[in-house]
Image (cartoon, coloured by chain):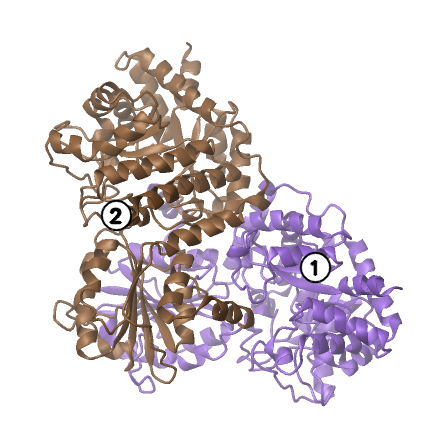
Chain colours: A brown, B purple
Amino acid sequence: MTDAERRRAVARLLVIRASGHAEDGQRRYPRWELCNRELERLLGSGVGGVILLGGTATELQQRCRTLRHWSTDGDLLLCADVEEGIGQRFEGATWLAPPMTLGRLHRSNPDHALHLAERYGRTTAAQARRCGLNWVLAPVCDVNSNPENPVINVRAWGDQAQAVADLVDAFHRGLNAAGVLGCAKHFPGHGDTDQDSHLELPLISHARSRIEQLELVPFRRLIASGVASVMTAHLLIPALDPSQPATLSRSVLTDLLRTELGFSGLVVTDALVMEAISRSLGPSEAAVQAFAAGADLILMPADADQAIDGICAALAQGRIPESRLSESLQRRAQALQRCDEAAGSETELDLVTPADDEFSMELVSSSLEIQGPLLAAHPEQDAVNLIRVDGVLPCAFLRSDASAITKPERHGYRALICHDKGIEPWAMNRDTAEPLELERLGKGPVFLQLFLRGNPFRAGQQRHEPWDRAIQQLLRVERLSGLAVYGCPYRWDSLRRLVPDHIPAGYCPGQMPEAQKQLLDRMLGMNWDEQARKDFTD
Amino acid sequence: MTDAERRRAVARLLVIRASGHAEDGQRRYPRWELCNRELERLLGSGVGGVILLGGTATELQQRCRTLRHWSTDGDLLLCADVEEGIGQRFEGATWLAPPMTLGRLHRSNPDHALHLAERYGRTTAAQARRCGLNWVLAPVCDVNSNPENPVINVRAWGDQAQAVADLVDAFHRGLNAAGVLGCAKHFPGHGDTDQDSHLELPLISHARSRIEQLELVPFRRLIASGVASVMTAHLLIPALDPSQPATLSRSVLTDLLRTELGFSGLVVTDALVMEAISRSLGPSEAAVQAFAAGADLILMPADADQAIDGICAALAQGRIPESRLSESLQRRAQALQRCDEAAGSETELDLVTPADDEFSMELVSSSLEIQGPLLAAHPEQDAVNLIRVDGVLPCAFLRSDASAITKPERHGYRALICHDKGIEPWAMNRDTAEPLELERLGKGPVFLQLFLRGNPFRAGQQRHEPWDRAIQQLLRVERLSGLAVYGCPYRWDSLRRLVPDHIPAGYCPGQMPEAQKQLLDRMLGMNWDEQARKDFTD
């Protein structure tokens, strides 16, 4: 193999990041998303994978065609982080309630939950194919055993190892049936951390035996079912490797995953640009160590050329045996063989089918939790609909026509939105029993809608917001007219207990428009006929 | 002509509204934007025009292909309200500083302003064609003689009749050169109103002689230059017609526009769903009266089928002579003949050219107004970057990576965003000399960034915000560190006078990302080399 051939071969193992938009000016994260000129150059030089984020489903279809056109070697891996349906990342496709929805349903109705989990996989895979993707970076196999988990949370299929194993297996069957590759992540398990690996390197201090009994259970199951790929976690787990994070650990990736668990598919790193890795290692060394430890594919290296150069040098120096390169290339080729050749050939008009919409609705309706009476209308009073979100620049699920705004408005509630860059509703000293600056919220009843879930990069934000005491304060002054929580079930479970029986409260694990619509239709007591008429005449 | 033939012929004269997005679920305004099933049915039944709004430029390309596919008669008019470049409405295309930019430049450098106006038309038309549009609903020919105008304002090419005539003529030459139809609007002139015709029917009480000397000047010029279409205004102008708004007035559309001014092209109504018309007339009667008055094309009827039925009945009853139908169809066919057959055939990759980007930058840089020293950095203090926008759900020019947020942040200013659904910065009683609730804004210096321009549907909002007194208040407590105004030149002219020489203040008529970037680079004193390095390392 010549140097040029080796460079081209190593490039096949990279998965670089691109915006789903066509124009460079549309990129949201130019720091991470390569410009078109660079993408074209790298794909032309052999790079074999792209992870896409941003844009609409229609743009994604066009984008995948363009990327395939730029790739001289043809068989491109095109993936996205679409754990909650393609619509989670690409507007216009179907956005599903998060996996935790089925984790909760599984407690009371496991058969139905498993049935829905398989449809979840099938729906996601079918739309992925119609957009041009052949690899879905799901399911999350982490058991969310820590309610304070800031980064997994509702992305997990539950907090019980066996149930999670059953659900991810059903999801994976659905993916498989539609001919799209899956990815079990984040190995060996990211469910028990209260730190965000986007920002720091979390430590898991459990003994090996506990990891065996809990964290590994869903991974073992998917490996047995032939999952195409496993994604590594940026976690330090001394019981498995006292010095290296899992992503860079030979003990974890080769000894445990390959040898003990017998996984023969593709091992892909989590994004190497994440702080947990990039803080201590340069772009070349991070890629070299991950590859040396046993990873086949290098996801989002901080610098693609340096990653390729580094791995080539390590191979040339004998630091990594040449056989590792041929093995990884062979695994990659085998995975691609599993993808149906038809991927991406469908037209855009069929992107979302009526069955997809129905499934999305069914998932939401199976997950609603409601207590208390209907929300009272207050057309004559200064009633406030206080909506809490992480941010609004933009907020994918909260646009001016969102149900969370328009439905309470018809009942007399004026929307007031709290977000990270707005003027706060909190008093100068929020650590008191009266944390809300009530005068800022008018004089009327307050309907509180909290969009709370663990979001990457937002780790600290929610901890400083005393919504529990705010609810108690509103109750004391008799101004709480209702509570809706969208997202984290643990927050809902603790906040719902504060709300007395005569005040309505509701919950949905999903935050997307369909979740708002159904939860509020139930809480406002609008029946479907009325609703249809209203939508028509408005 | 059989009834079916006549129905199909009348349908050619309708311009119905569609979202630029592919999927029904993506529509922002389902009340006005027809669903795909309805669009396909109406285009199949002969409807001859579509006005598009929303989505990205890539989606628009795909959308125009789909609509042409649905249209059984082929020669579809596809238009959009892209007065400020295609990027104003379709993300990813070029978003230009508004026409008023050149109205201001024209005072000091008329030749350069006219040169830029022609490029403005050429750039807009070329991108329109690459997206698949063949009709641009511009230029605005209204002379913005009223600084309080809530709906025209910076959309106008100035406030002097002769300068506006010269500029719109140059713009129109540019459009023409690129083979796209233009539209002179809003006839006979919408520049002198302080009401919003989206919400009510404004009254223009000027004498005929003044309208002749001011309002009609730019329209006469474009008619002489052969503009393809003229759009009617929803205005009551007793000097021209004491009982009917211009859109429905035979005196205005036939006697004045056709006979006196000799216009032989297409007369198109403004949107008939607007409150100024729809409040008093049903969907059928509004269309019938507009057609009877002399309009050729019916834009956004509240109900397409009723509009067609109504016009067919009026023709059958002899209320409107059959010759009007054949004349309008003939004008429509002549206009379409002028469009180059090549429209829409370009590929998506060339949508935005480097020349387009350069033009957009040049337009902004020609429009900046700066006074005072550089903005001071405050890395150690509790400095606030107070940003005022209409709304954030979403705000097309203010995303988390917007220069208005990130550039002051590097200088120590934390962004705090005021918008229509946020908690207000105002004191309980804002009618005092201390309108701001200063405690909500921390203790440090305040950099005020005001995005103010006349926006449809927002008429009243800005009038209740006493930014003049807020600036005086911040000056008194020595907390104003700078002022930036984006948008309305009249607001800038009045606010700049309040700011003393030692405090930096700057203005750009544009609000889009490029405007923020250039204005803040100038106000923060970052030179281009530094900037390039920063962008690279960040």
- Front one among B446 and B504: B446
Q: Which residue is mark 2?
A: A107
Residue B335 drawn above or below residue A74: below
Q: Amino acid at mark 2?
A: Arg
Q: Amino acid at mark 1?
A: Leu
Residue A187 point in image, percent of width and height: 25, 32
A131 left or right of B407 in image = right
Quadrant into which the N terminus of chain A falls = top left
Under circle 1, the secondary element is helix
Residue B30's quadrant in the figure? bottom right
Residue A206 drawn above or below residue A421: above
- Front one among A428 and B192: A428
Q: Which residue is mark 1?
A: B42
Q: Is residue A6 visible?
A: yes
Residue A216's mark? Answer: none
Residue A509 point in image, percent of width and height: 31, 54
Q: Chain of mark 1?
A: B
Q: Is residue B132 visible?
A: no
